[in-house]
Image (spheres, coloured by chain):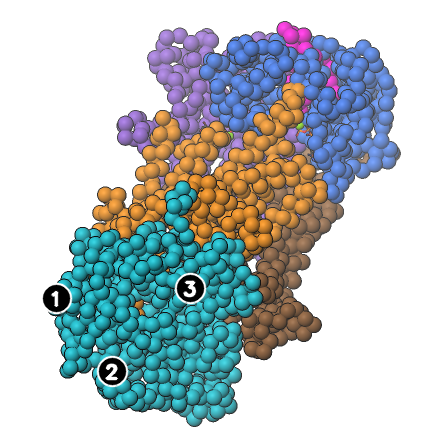
Chain colours: A blue, B orange, C brown, D purple, E cyan
Amino acid sequence: MPLEVVKSGQNLLEVEDLKTYFFMKDATVKAVDGVSFSLAAGETFGLVGESGSGKSQTLRSILRLIAPPGRIISGSVRYKGQDLLKVPLGEMRKYRGSEIGMIFQEPMTALNPVIRIREQIFESLENKGLTTDQKNARAVELLRLVGVPSPERRIEEYAHQFSGGMRQRAMIAITLAAEPKILLADEPTTALDVTIQDQILKLIVSLKERLGMSVIMVTHDLGIVAQMCDRVAVMYAGRIVEITDTLTLFGAPRHPYTLGLMGSLPHGARGSRLQPITGQPPNLANLPPGCPFAPRCRFAESICTETYPEMVQVGPGHFSRCHFIAKLDGQSGIIDLGNVAEGRR
Amino acid sequence: MKQLNYIVGRLLQIIPVLFFVTVLIFMMIHLIPGDPAETILGDKATVEQLTILRHQMGLDRPLVEQYLLFLKNLGTLNLGDSFIYHVPVTDLLANRVPVTIALTIMSTIFGALIAFPMGYFAAFNKDRAFDQGVRVWTLIALTMPGFWIALLLMLLFGLKLHWFPVGGLGEGLFGKFYSLILPAFTQALGLSALWTRNLRNNVVDVLRMDYVDFAKSKGLRDRVVIVRHVLRNALISTVTLMAMSFTRMLGGSVITETVFALPGVGKLMVDSIFARDYGIIQAITFIFALLVMVMNLATDISYSFLDPRVKLE
Amino acid sequence: MEPATAPNAAGDLAPAPAPATASARVKRKSIPFWRKSLALNLGIIIVAFVFFVGFFPGLIAPYNPNTQNADLMLQAPSAAHILGTDNYGRDILSRVIWATRADLQIGLIGTAIPFVFGTLVGLLAGYYGGVIDQILMRLVDIVVAFPFIVLVIAIIAFLGPGIYNLYMAISLVGWVPYARIIRGEVLVAKNLDYVSAARVLGYSDWRIILRHILPNVLSSSIVYTAADVVFCMLAGASMGFLGLGVQPPTPEWGQAISEGRVFIARAWWLSTFPGFALVFVGTGFSLLGDGLSDLLRTKGR
Amino acid sequence: MAVASIGEQPLVVIKDLYKHFPLKQAILDVIARKPALSVRAVDGVSLVIKQGETLGLVGESGCGKSTLAKAILRLEEPDKGTVLFNGKDITHISRQEFRGHRRHMQMVFQDPYSSLNPRLSVREMLIEAMTVHKVCAPKDAEARVAELMAMVGMNIAAADRFPGEFSGGQRQRLGIARALAVDPLFIIADEPVSALDVSIQAQVINLLQDLQENLHLTLLFVSHDLRVIRHITHRVAVMYLGKVVELAPTQELFERPLHPYTKVLAAAAPVLDPRVRHREYAIEGEPPSPIHIPTGCRFHPRCVRARDICKASEPELQEVAPGRTVACHFWGQ
Amino acid sequence: SGKAKNTGKTIIMARPADSDNLDPVMQDGNVNIWVFNLAMEGLVKTDNEGTKNDLPALATEYKWSDDKKAITFTLRKGVKFSDGTNMTADDVVFSLNRAYQTKDSPWQFALDAISKVEKVDADHVKVSLKQPAPAAMAGLAMFNAVITSKAYFDKVGAQGYSQKPLGTGPFYIAEWKKGEYILLKRNPYYWEKGKPLVDQIKITVVPDDNTRIMQLQSGAVDMVENIPFSRIADIQKDPNLNMILVPSTMTYYLGFNLTKKPFDNLKVREALAYGTDKAALIKTVVFGAGYEATSFMPKSGPNWDATIKSRPYDPDKAKAMLKDAGVAPGTKLELSINSANVTQVQIATVLKDQWARIGIDLQVKQMDNATLRSTYKALNHQIIIAGWTNDIVDPSEIAAYMTYPDTSKNFWTGWAIADPAGAKKAEDLARKAEYETDAAKRTQEYNELQEYIDQQMPRISLYHTPYTFATSKKITGFVQTPLGNYLFQNLDKTK
Ligand SMILES: Nc1ncnc2c1ncn2[C@@H]1O[C@H](COP(=O)(O)OP(=O)(O)OP(=O)(O)O)[C@@H](O)[C@H]1O
Ligand SMILES: Nc1ncnc2c1ncn2[C@@H]1O[C@H](COP(=O)(O)OP(=O)(O)OP(=O)(O)O)[C@@H](O)[C@H]1O
Ligand SMILES: [Mg+2]
Ligand SMILES: [Mg+2]
């Protein structure tokens, strides 16, 4: 693992060689298998990949929210230089919430159904030395901040009384209440309408700017990446296969999988044929040796099914795991870096 | 308002059900061979004597008329007379209903006292020795007939250790409570096994829920996470199950009351069926049905309080 | 060098290669069901054993279970009578073995009839909803309003004691849980897309109910059956206690336990061994049920 | 069936279709004679789907897209209105009679996990559909299964497996195969790719597109993903709170949306270019509930252009250019 | 409880079932008789052994009229009811009138001979009979002829009376919690000075045999009624307990329904008797605590015929006889029993095995008591098991039941229907004996009747058993008569 991926020392958060496996009766699921990346202060870092590629488990591992049969096998998660994986589990709560907060993927299941929203916000306001009235005021303010209408009334309600978008907002409010330095956002808009998604994403952007947070944004929607992220890592089968800045990703991706993703995107008008990746995502329980993408890869050769490719640097801050980076030279993504695409608005 | 709406709706539903329950039981018991006149007069009675008594008791009237009379009495909250004891059924039940209800409540409390810690610790020690031990225990407790458990408890705690009386209802409030301990325990044992398993599985399920992790991700203390987020959610369905066990306990009281010589309704019901004491049977059925339905209603309402997601519709 | 996998130039219309079977193959390799749940294995073994005993008690029982011998009353366990003899001088081991038949019958028939009837009611109520649902569910309310045992007693008083009436009584009340479970599942299943698909395909209601809904809603009630078998056996035992159960001298555990209770001080073996048998078999079925639900839980997504 | 090119002839004509779901009324409300409320899921929709075209249906979650789809197929009995299929009224015939028409109109569902009966093997599933409708002679059924599997890009070896053994994308192909099994003329695809990963999504989109073209199918394609809609459809209908508010050929709609709501939808979709980042909200507020639909133009509470007339009177769907209709008082501005 | 402290000695006795009706005239069953008999007395009473029935009670003496058609009783002086009011001749007349005149009383038969009861003077009451009846005195000693206060009865009415009858007995009924207990308290006005010895008797209801015995063993109760025979041996071994076996008139028998085939055939009935091993029954069912019954009349009652012997157990002979009678091996016969009665269940269990050996496939039909009663009363049964106890110290009661067709269809054998001539002969014999005033002749006639019935076998008498009663060793002075009545005047409890 080239150290450049994780520029040691200068970052708010550095994840290195993180491995989280699930030990099932019949197999070991390598959900996160040697993930390394870093997050600078004020940065929005994207984590993309298809379903099951290990995005959520990576985030959970950062907060050490992995329950049996899952276990963090190795690696380090350095937050401000402190390796969180070495902190006694009992002390993790010092980092959770107030330092690193997380928005869960499913607002439906991540909010406790039997506790009022207010109490759930209060929980994040604990240890801040606030009186109940102050907490109340703060909670209302937070809900208003995230755009929940008539927050004084809705604070008394339960999660099920909220619509999907409102739930997501409530969850953001709960997480933000603790004023984290880093926000881990796990597909915060997947379940939502475009209009609501638009609102939530823009909310996150504005909050981030106001509160000076860093954000790790997990998504499988490249549109969100384009709109939100400074840098991106593409995950495939538990590993990061490409990591670069957003513009490069869209303009000159250097991994066959990323290229395939671009080709799969319907982006133009009717008539053009899509160029999807063939085949199905691999099963993390029975990964063959070699590159897990090989069976679906246009460029694959026999070596790909035999040895696992190392991460190689292909440009400044641009790394890719592929035996045949050279073959990809000249392939371009969906935007032409030459000229700025025309905005639609 | 929503609640009130719901309650009114449900109460309205109870009426036809109660009506059918009473019709059913009325038909059933009146169609069984044998009648109270025979029970009262015994083997030595002549046909003539029987005829006289039947007439006095109104048993020679058409069934429909008898039923209407029963309904009419019900309307005035008069549950009729016991044919055998010659006293108003309400008098008989006044002493007995509290015994059965006390027994049921105590059984519930004991059951909860057994089930909650067991289920909880089993879940937190999932698949470890304690969990397996609890599993074995629940399997056995579920399969032991109540009267057999009762016998063992009486032998051990009554006869050998002299801790508790061997059956009978004590005197005074404390005496009564004291004498209900073993019977309640008997009833609690089998049910608590059911509840333990339910709670254990619930806790295991809840522990997997995202909201528990979300709570942890806020940096909450473990105790808070467990009490507020895990237990509360896990208990919802266990509490419902406990409420649903109510009917079963009423039924179980038949046997418990017999074995422990308790003057409750269950035993009275069985005796009355055998004695064809129509008055009592009808009254108890009616009360049981009412109790069960009110209990079900209360369960549903309390369920909606415990779990705000449940809409009362 | 040729690419390992040729790009699918023809697009997706050509038969897709391996992927169609890839995940299936992975599943194939996964461990067989019987290695997934210890409870299930134990349950299957016990229940299979019990079935064997229940079907061929004559092969195992050393004596005729009903032969009395006044000279051999209340003998303690010995080599000749491994579990001792009862108050009629009958061999307890043989009676315990033969009782398997009656108890299994109570457990299975007492479960099977309610299962079938309750399933039917649940299917109709759940699928058609509306008035049919209302009527059937009120019927459920009526049955539920009686405590189980009391209703069974009343029915037996009506029909007279005996094993067939016991089935009848248990069946008349036992269908309710099945109806409820199935109805609940049908309410969910009928809104699933594959049922909509079946309707879009113009299938008849009966085809949809029997072929598309029924097989998919059975699992939780099948799990319930295992518990229900135990419950029925216990109900049978309670009836035996009240003198409303199986007709003597047919051997039956519940009755043996309750009749043996009087001898507890003098001849503990009378009720203890049938008690063990009941617990053993009950445990077997409970384990089976646990195992089945384990299995279904892991199978579900 | 005569091969018809797009636009020649309408295949499905929906006239003023309504589907309301009455809310359960509480006893006390009934006694108090409060008016019964209902979810007005489809609230007067008229649409023409032409033979051989792919019509897109977009709109926010809950605006009634699925209900409309189901009402056309009588999975939900419409309250009012008519659906003509090939000129024949199919809403006012008995269910029995309608069953005979079912094979002509099929549906592909959104959730690949719940849309296949887990207890039937692929073969059983396909053969059942064919035998019920006697699509082909029993002896040809096997061959047809193979043909269908090939059509949807699946290996015939998979025919004996059960749905649980397939991935989401494969299941979606099987769902399509099932719909094709009865040789339909018209297929409604209700968000057929929303649940799939991008790479798989693309496979299914290609498949649908190819099938539509090769088999001359008429397709109603429901989605809220504008990128997909833009890619696959010929014309698009935009729904808002139970009504169609705009209908236009795809290209034109995206290039020149007329209804303010259409504009909002377009603006809300994230642009796939990191260099073009919008920071202002496309729209504020949430859609109102379909129970209390605003008076007048149902979009007016969220509309930046709303004026008094928008509150007062509901704009009719009007043809503003050939093939373009829109329901807005101020569509021109 | 607080109340107990000045009530002195309390004895607690547990029994399996509660009373239901304490009106001596209107109830049926020992559960009632044995209780109100502690509180009420008649003019005469039986002795402890149940052989004499004219011991003085509320009457100090009596005199038969010369034509033996009337008895004049001299009332005891100074007798008070337990409420402190005096007992008068009017009370006696009222009580006896009610006893013999109440049409729907199940016990009316015992006083059937009475034609009139009248007050002679304040101290004398005359009972007139329709004809000379030797059994009349026995009837007057019976529990339904107990004396109550007319004023009280008028005050509380029949219903109130059935809850709390008032009498002159050693105890009075102080409290009755249905299904739980009956509390009897010492009658302070009791005429026998110094009696009774204890202050209270609490009779509790404990349905389960095991529980009842455990309560005795644990000291919670002092006396327990109805010990299962299987437990006699245990209790006898217990150093703290007394096992009391009270000789009783209890007779268990199998009753055939002669109106049903093949029981109309005497051969079959006899064969079944030969096929019944009474000794084994006694051993397994009553654990040796009983003895063989030969006659339909109890051995412990008067006029029992010692010359009758049971048919010996001889399965081969039984088989042969059945074959002769045309009953094929494997024939199914039906035995209807009360499912709640353990003894009946046990007898049925043993019989099924015994009769299987003579080729009879006995079908045991269990039903609850009420159904069973309706079944046999309608003669819908084939065989029943029943037990009988005498209520009076005279053979006339059982003889009448066995032979008078109208009262009980000959004990539900349907004899008079199936074989009118035979039944008529028995009836004539019984009627003659009932009114026979010459004691020796009467014995002779009853013997003849017993022999005739033994020969005709409308039933098979099985065995006699004692009443089983256990007390703690502290209890003294326990008396129960063969009729079952408790005499607790001398009951006491030592420390
Ligand atoms: N509790 C668990 N037990 C076993 N395997 C698990 C568990 N949780 C996750 N996994 C596996 O870990 C892998 C990664 O899961 P993860 O949730 O991180 O995916 P993801 O990238 O977030 O996907 P999605 O986009 O669907 O959210 C998956 O293959 C999943 O099957
Ligand atoms: N069976 C039903 N009973 C009551 N209300 C219903 C029913 N089906 C749908 N609805 C309601 O009708 C409205 C329209 O639902 P529909 O499913 O048609 O929306 P949709 O546009 O398909 O949304 P999505 O994009 O979320 O699938 C929603 O408010 C929904 O809650
Ligand atoms: Mg995820
Ligand atoms: Mg939809």
Which one is in front in this view, the residue at disc 1 or the one at disc 2? 1
What quarter of the picture does the C terminus of chain B occupy? top left
The CB of the residue at mark 2 lies under 8 Å from ligand 2: no
Q: Is residue A217 magenta?
A: yes
Q: Whole-percent x and y of residue D100? A: 44, 46
- In terms of depth relative to the viewer, which is nearer, E44 or D269? E44
Q: Pointer 1 and pointer 2: residues touching (CB < 8 Å)?
A: no
Labels 3 and 1 share a subunit: yes
The residue singled out by tag 2 in the image is E434
- In terms of depth relative to the viewer, which is nearer, A8 or B62? B62
Q: Which residues are magenta?
A: A208-233
The residue singled out by tag 1 in the image is E121
Quick check: can you spot residue D201? no
Labels 2 and 3 share a subunit: yes
Crowd class of label 2 (few under 14; some 14 to 19; many from 20; radius 10 Å): many
Marker disc for residue E477? 3
The residue depicted at 31 percent of the width and 44 percent of the height is B16
